[in-house]
Image (cartoon, rainbow, N blue to C red):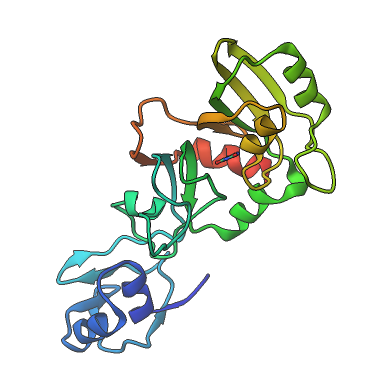
Amino acid sequence: MSLIRLDKYLADMQVGTRSEVKKLIRAGKVQLGGHICKNADEKFDPEQVAVMVDHVSVGYAAYEYFMLNKPKGCVSATEDPRYPTVLDYITEHKRKDLFPVGRLDLDTEGLLVITNDGALAHELLSPSKHIPKTYEAKIDGIVTETDVERFAQGIDIGEKKPTRPADLVILKANVISHVRITICEGKFHQIKRMFAAVGKPVLELKRISMGALQLDEGLATGEYRPLTEEEIGYLRQRG
Ligand code: URA
């Protein structure tokens, strides 16, 4: 059982700011378990006790999980002085403490999990877990079997150690090549640096999966949806 203060709960549920919800409570507009409660400090268990504001029930979610098809031009952060953040795309949510699990570059698209479950995020991002992340990319140059072998062996991208083996699949080899690449780590700009190391710049990058979680092809860039229970299970298994 976890208890929460009434004013904090209402603010977390976005009913209003702390001072706004305190006013609502004082005005007798908030019911806790069917009774008007005028005490903002009152602690209760939101899993057990129903809360109503102006006779409308307030939903409670301890944790929320979303899949966003991240568009280019937004940052994987909770706030930014220059760019929109990935959270700006999650327009309907209950929790105020959402954050993206890991980072995609400003110009990278695709699968990004957004949640307030810090423990799960920590597990997914832990370098020791080696969660595979698969991307599709357009590459400036002809990607060859030699590149496939070099990526499988590990590449020097200027870190202490070479990259861990990456699975590179050539979908189309041409002046602009199309590839699918799976990496099991998440160094800063990793895929761009790997291709830079073989002299072939990345033109476009899109993440299509993370562990067993696949990007929903029905989501246009910029669209999101809650994860299903099954999908949350995929992430937990990997953690
Ligand atoms: N590798 C990159 O270079 N950029 C990303 O956004 C993700 C992986």
In this view, 32 is above or below 67: below
In the displayed structure, 48 sits above or below 234; it is below
Position of residue 125 relative to residue 97, above or below, is: above
**Left or right: residue 34 compared with residue 226:** left
Q: Quadrant of residue 27?
A: bottom left
Residue 42 coordinates in the image, percent (x, y): 37, 85
What residue is shown at x 62% (from left), y 58% (from top)?
Answer: 119
Nearest to the observer: residue 210 or residue 1 = 210
Name the residue at 54% across, 13% down: 175
In the image, 129 versus 173, the foreground residue is: 173
Badge count: 0
In the image, 51 versus 219, the foreground residue is 219
Q: Position of residue 70 (x, y in %)?
A: 42, 41
Percent of width and height locating residue 216: 43, 29
Which residue lies at the image location 38% right of the left edge and 78% below the top edge? Answer: 8
Q: Dividing the image into four quarters, tell me where ligand 1 lies.
A: top right
In this picture, residue 138 sits left or right of residue 21: right
| Relative image position of residue 237 (x, y in whole percent) | 65, 40
Q: Is residue 206 left or right of residue 72?
A: right
Residue sitting nearer the eye, 89 or 93: 89
